[in-house]
Image (spheres, rainbow, N blue to C red):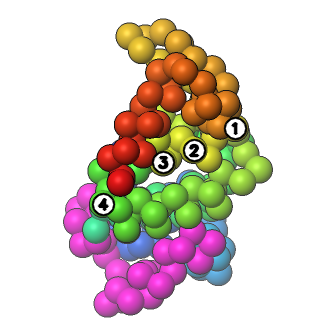
Amino acid sequence: VTQEAFLFSGTVADNIAIGRPDATREEIEQAAKAIGAHEFISALPDGYDTDVRKRGGRISAGQRQLVAFARALLADPAVLILDEATSSLDVPGERAVQRAMATVLRGRTAVVIAHRLSTVEIADRVLVMEHGRIVEDGGPRELIAGTGRFADLHKAWRDSLA
């Protein structure tokens, strides 16, 4: 799942099923429900049969991300890579995608590349990189409690929310 979810021209259902073209409609809808996308999809003019148009232009960035997460959940990969999956979203969109992330990541290995610390907080292990080198390695709580770069970033982030 990348920063900007890429959708193909075609229906919402087709876009969710890209990783499993043999998926049934019921499986597609179950994935969307688990992610929290079913409600907005059902409200589209033709529901799951709505053409999202070129690059998913018919739906919002947050909705495109939810479709991408439903796609990932349906494909059921052993390893999932999320590359800045929340960076281009507004706060409501980010919250929806974070709920989706918790569902998709459950029970699987994931590499999460993120600048937004709210995205990193759910990790078991965090690697902080600077200039292409790992400068810190540990659990989020451990690093937040420390005195390193991650603790500084986390403090600045929390202060910005106040």
Q: Disc 1 or 4, which lies upstream in sequence?
A: 4
Q: Disc 4 or 2, which lies upstream in sequence?
A: 4
Picture quadrant where residue 99 is located = bottom right
Q: Residue at x 44, y 28 (%)?
A: 152
Q: Disc 1, disc 2: CB below 8 Å?
A: no
Amino acid, disc 4: Asp
Using the image, tell me which numbered label, if any, was put on residue 90. Answer: 4
How busy is the neighbourhood of tag 3: few (under 14 within 10 Å), some, or many (20 plus)?
A: some
* Magenta span: 33-59
User: What is the spatial separation of the Cα atoms under label 3 and label 1, in whole angstroms?
Assistant: 14 Å
Q: Residue at x 65, y 51 (%)?
A: 105
Q: Which residue is mark 1?
A: 124
Q: Disc 3 or 1, which lies upstream in sequence?
A: 3
How busy is the neighbourhood of tag 1: few (under 14 within 10 Å), some, or many (20 plus)?
A: few
Q: Which residue is mark 2?
A: 121
SS of the residue under disc 3: helix
User: What is the spatial separation of the Cα atoms under label 1 and label 4, in whole angstroms?
Assistant: 25 Å
